[in-house]
Amino acid sequence: MLKIISAHEAASYINDGDVLAFSGFTASGAPKVVTEALAERAKAEHEAGKPFKTGIFTGASTSEHLDGALALADAIDFRTPYQSNANMRACINSRRIHYFDMHLSHLAQELRYGFHKKINLAIIEAADVSENGEIVLTSGVGIIPTAALLAEKIIIELNRFTPKSVKGLHDIYVPLDPPYRREIPVYKPSDRCGNAVLKVDPNKIIGIVETNLPDGLSPYTPADAITETIGANVADFLATQLRENKIPSSFLPIQSGVGNIANAVLGSLGANKYIPPFEMYTEVIQDSVIGLVRTGNIKFASGCSLSLSDDMMTEVYSDLNSFRDKFVLRPQEISNNPEIVRRLGLITINTALEADIFGNINSTHVLGTKMMNGIGGSGDFARNAYISIFTCPSVAKGGKISAIVPMVSHLDHSEHSVKVIITEQGIADLRGKSPVQRAKTIIENCVHPDYKQLLWDYLKLGGTSHTPHTLNACFKMHSEFLNSGDMRQTDWAK
């Protein structure tokens, strides 16, 4: 019989040096109380002069309950594959935590391949669990099907906030490993290929901790003039592609990243009268998706998590019958699977931190050195997209930073994976263009007026080379910001 235990008893089973894996994807579906108790234990061990750190595998970012609490408690040795917590980020950038960034679709299979450390304990948030080890997950899946398979032991947080009636929203499928792997039988976003429940060996389950807590997600900041314009530019571009028969008249599934720009883009797609109702095959289903499902603009959404604000989640849970045939939640190696992305012909829309005039993208590092969050799933999608779009505001820090520079300070997506760049200034379609043609298109259409002449002048420095970089000047805009706090002061002659 499965045993009910406290969060502190659960934390007592975790030892210094253990490697832990967690359910969820974003804060959705991530454990909440065992990690808080573990942070308390780590602090107590440190106060007693004892070492206490753990390795952590997650699906993606988590929450203050997990990444935040454990980072503050100095309880993390290494962390992968993605994070977005301020405390975690500070520890990573001071090298107190060893962080290795990864494409999200890679982690589960690399764990099965034995490329990483062995998982001692998996902690899983569940809406329901049976004596024979059938688990109904909550709002996020992540890597937990593989982690539960590999872990020596399992602890379950049984969260009463999520109704048992979510059973049926999930599609749990773990592909075979090479050389036995077969095609994944998903031919449209609504196809299912796995089970509604996660099945684990019940003998691994050492205890159940009962909770009743929401994920704690707040609504995203409403769109402002810049994000609205970016969204409208994306919608206008895709509408033009439809008119020119470069996209099938029935349209194609959309993948969209996370955050305010992504919400603005989806809102603009829904509002554009030339964009027909569409499906999504993506990672994260956000609040904006719910509204578009209700209006019929989105017909179906496949993802890895329902990353909804608490109020929106309450609405969805109270009206599950209306949404049951509109969503499916999958493990991230399926939601982000490159082969499915290419076969379905996804239009992918992701946010850049920085782009350069030749079409390379930095998604992760501020000024090339400080980790922001991580690459996430953008690489899984962009490299294999029907059309890959990257969006960003043209400037940051009140105009003191140009998001478009001569050379990206860190490379996550090369020019070969980037088809279109869109800012609030306009649209740069890079398909079929040489490096100089790409540079001219980006400068003319996407760069803020304060930086256009500066970047035209840089382009002239390179002479007649195929890719006219000037190596002693390509990072001068970054250096100028570090020196004076304003890239606009860059002087190529110095």
Image (cartoon, rainbow, N blue to C red):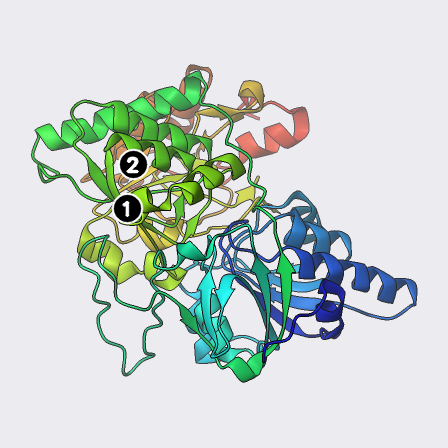
- Give amino acid for label 2: Val
Circle 2 sits on which residue?
Answer: 293
Q: Position of residue 461 (x, y in %)?
A: 41, 30
Q: Residue 272: x percent and y percent? A: 23, 23
Q: Which residue is mark 1?
A: 326
- For the residues bearing labels 2 and 1, Cβ distance under 8 angstroms: yes
In this rendering, the answer to whether 116 lies above or below 269 is below
Q: Residue at x 32, y 78 (%)?
A: 176
Name the foreground residue: 429 vs 140: 140
| Quarter of the image that includes the N terminus | bottom right
Residue 452 image-quadrant placement: top left
Circle 1 crowding by C-alpha within 10 Å: few under 14, some 14–19, many from 20: some
Q: Residue at x 55, y 40 (%)?
A: 217
The image quarter containing residue 433 is top left
* Disc 1, SS: loop
Which callout, 2 or 1, points at the residue further toward the start of the chain?
A: 2
Viewer-closest of 92 and 182: 182
Q: In 3D space, how far apart are the residues under numbered discs 2 and 1 (Cα atoms)?
A: 8 Å
